[in-house]
Amino acid sequence: MATLTATSYESVDVVVVGAGLSGLQAALDVQKSGLSCVILEARDRVGGKTLSQPLASGKGVVDLGAAWLNEATQPKIYALAKKYGYETVIQPFKGDGIVEDTSGTIHRVAQDHLPDLPAATLRAIGMITSFLETEAAKLDLRHLPISEFDKLTVSEFLKKKGANEDTYKFFETTIKGLLGVDATELSLFFYLDYIKSGGSLEELMSEKSDGAQYQRLRQGMQSISKGMAGDLQPGSLFLNSPVSHIHQEKNPSTCVVTTQRGKQFRAKKVIISIPTPLYRTIKFSPALPKAKMTLADSTTLGYYAKTILIYDKPWWTELGLRGSFISLTGAVSFSYDTSVEADAQYSITCFIVGGTGRKWSILSPIKRRQTVLDQIAAMVGDEHGHRVYQTEEIIEDEWIKEHWSQGAPSPVMGPNLLNKYADVLRVPCGNLHFVGTETAYEWKGYMDGAVSAGERGAGEVIQALIKPAAGQS
């Protein structure tokens, strides 16, 4: 999609900053209401943290970013997939998984089972899981209480519960998978809120019909964003247009939005759909309120990378495996079978996340790939480990090195933030409105949350601009 000129859009009702799912949904809703709206995207593409890449072989695509949805629990993103006619693929879950514990021992584990760890470790995992599920279930996401849990990191909580090394790493690996950070980096209260946002910890980790990893799209998740962009009014999407300055004028009450190339748009409202930590990349005048900037400066995005191993056939299924390799110590924390049988696309997507990912990241590209291959081969075992190296293609992506993302999947709060700033994420600042997946109540950090947040932001500006005008007529 080419960069477009702004000749006919120098003055509009609404400017949306960011063409990820949240921004696209907001722009579509605003335009549908009859208001004029442009959307400015810094990248040369739409989709934000949805990014799908065709394979060199021509056998379909793989997702470098967000990859899963659920037709029952994530209705908004599923409805968009169906609206544009995309085909869902159920995540394979039959077969055994491989788990490496902190001692380096390899366990072959049946679906829905834990590895053969000491009884005390299994009891501790069960007890802590029950605590997290129970406390998360108590939360009212729209009216969060002040909680003592916000004073603790998850790491401190686990240590207070007497977690041994395997227990600690079990929960930390889960956190790394969900948010790309270590247990030392987020508050227990934030984690409980995040769990409740996705239903439960069990649902967040599941590949079954109630789970967050239940379905993928044959055409890739970015296809939804492309479909949405195609529904925008012609000429209203501007790629390669990073915003450098947003000035709010008092009289008249308007905003002037300036891109890095110097193009200016005057609007009554601005919807900002970029990750909270990236607010600092834009100059706001007057400055954003202190609380909003504290969030921008204090929240962090996780380290999240994928190395996708592509094969000519799914050799792991021949071994009775489902492509799940979980390590409590290795560079690869976990993996999924991300094949699409209809395209003869056979792949294992390896996730390198959190602190172990940051250490892996400083290696050379060749060494990074070799580390991934060696780890998975060792987990497969001597007899069949050689098959890991027989790849057709390897694709790697590190979101932290993407300038307009700076990490994934969603900003994280450390201790003593959520108690103070639970509502600040969503509060407008004058004529500025804020969306993005982290501002969602349900499914924050996920595509469904991004869409619902976009709907909320659009609703705010439509309410403000159309209802008063209707009352004056």
Image (spheres, rainbow, N blue to C red):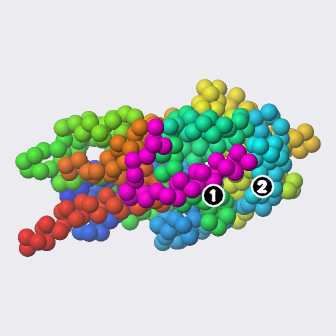
Distance Cα–Cα, label 2 vs label 1? 13 Å
Look at the picture and state if 363 lies above or below 30: above
Q: Which is the main secondary structure of the residues drawn in magenta?
A: helix
Q: Quadrant of residue 268?
A: bottom left
Front-most of residues 286 and 256: 286
Query: Residue placed at 70% from the left, 47% from the top?
Result: 125
Sequence-earlier tag: 2 or 1: 2
Q: Which mark is residue 323?
A: none
Q: Is residue 224 magenta?
A: no
Secondary structure beneath label 1:
helix
Q: Amino acid at mark 2?
A: His
Look at 51% across and 50% down and name the residue there: 192
List x then y, in percent, for residue 374: 78, 35
Q: Is residue 7 visible?
A: no
Secondary structure under the numbered disc 2 in the rendered image = loop
Q: Label 1, on which residue?
A: 202
Q: Which residues are magenta?
A: 123-151
Give the position of the C terminus as an image quadrant. bottom left
Residue 469 in picture, x, y percent from top left: 12, 68
- Residue count near mark 2 (Cα–Cα under 10 Å), binned few <14, some 14–19, many ≥20: few
Asked whether 216 or 433 is in front, the reply is: 433
Q: Which residue is mark 2?
A: 113
Categorize mark 1 by other alpha carbons within 10 Å: few (<14), some (14-19), many (20+).
Answer: some
